[in-house]
Amino acid sequence: MTKILVLDTETTGVSSSDEPIEIAAALYEVDSTGNLVAKLDTYSGRREPMVPISSMAQKVHKISKADLAGRDFDHEKVAVLLSNADVIVAHNADFDSRMLQPLYPGIKDKSWRCTINQWPWPFASGKSLSSVA
């Protein structure tokens, strides 16, 4: 059996100085043919960033600084999900990996799959998350 962590982040922007402000993740177990066996765990959390949220990012995710005041990720829970995952799947995996690495350094050693670059979407009008969802 393989454990797959499906993960998405929202961030303050796209530069190397930006930070993750939201993580949503679900850990699944699949069999050798890729069939879903079980949904094992989930997590959704937000954190207050140390840097401002760019106007471009806020237009995308509609999360304001006020929505994040005093909040932080459950780092223990996220670390457990990451360590239990054999594979992490994300839409734009390079970006999510880069954004999460400062908080979870071991993430760089995980096996990642990207739904933008490694998945065929024959019926989608594009590769944006809204097009393929």
Image (spheres, grey):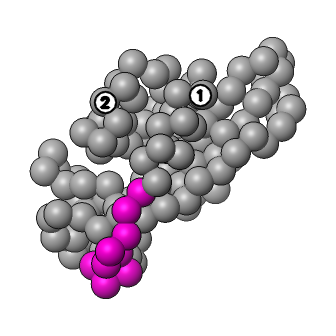
Judge whether 130 appears above or below 64 on screen. Answer: above
Give the percent coordinates (x, y) of residue 131.
57, 57
Q: CA distance from mark 2 to mark 1?
A: 15 Å
| Whether residue 81 is situated above or below residue 68 in the rendered picture | above
Left/right placement of residue 13 relative to residue 93 reads: left
Q: Is residue 10 left or right of residue 7?
A: left
Picture residue at 49% right of the left edge, 61% below the top: 45
Question: Any magenta on residue 131?
Answer: no
Tell me if residue 72 is in the magenta stretch: yes
Residue 105: assigned label = 2
Residue corresponding to mark 1: 85
- Screen quadrant of the C terminus: bottom right
- Looking at the rendering, which quadrant does residue 68 occupy? bottom left
Q: Quick one: 35 or 1, which is closer to the camera?
A: 1
What span is colored magenta in the figure? 65-73
Q: Which residue is farthest front?
A: 76
Q: Secondary structure at mark 1?
A: loop
Residue type highlighted by circle 1: Ala
Q: How many marks?
A: 2
Q: How busy is the neighbourhood of tag 2: few (under 14 within 10 Å), some, or many (20 plus)?
A: few
Q: Is residue 124 visible?
A: no
The tag on residue 49 is none
Q: Position of residue 101 (x, y in %)?
A: 30, 36
Identified at 15% across, 45% down, the residue is 16
Residue occupying the point 46% across, 22% down:
110
Secondary structure under tag 2 reads helix
As drawn, 80 above or below 30 = below
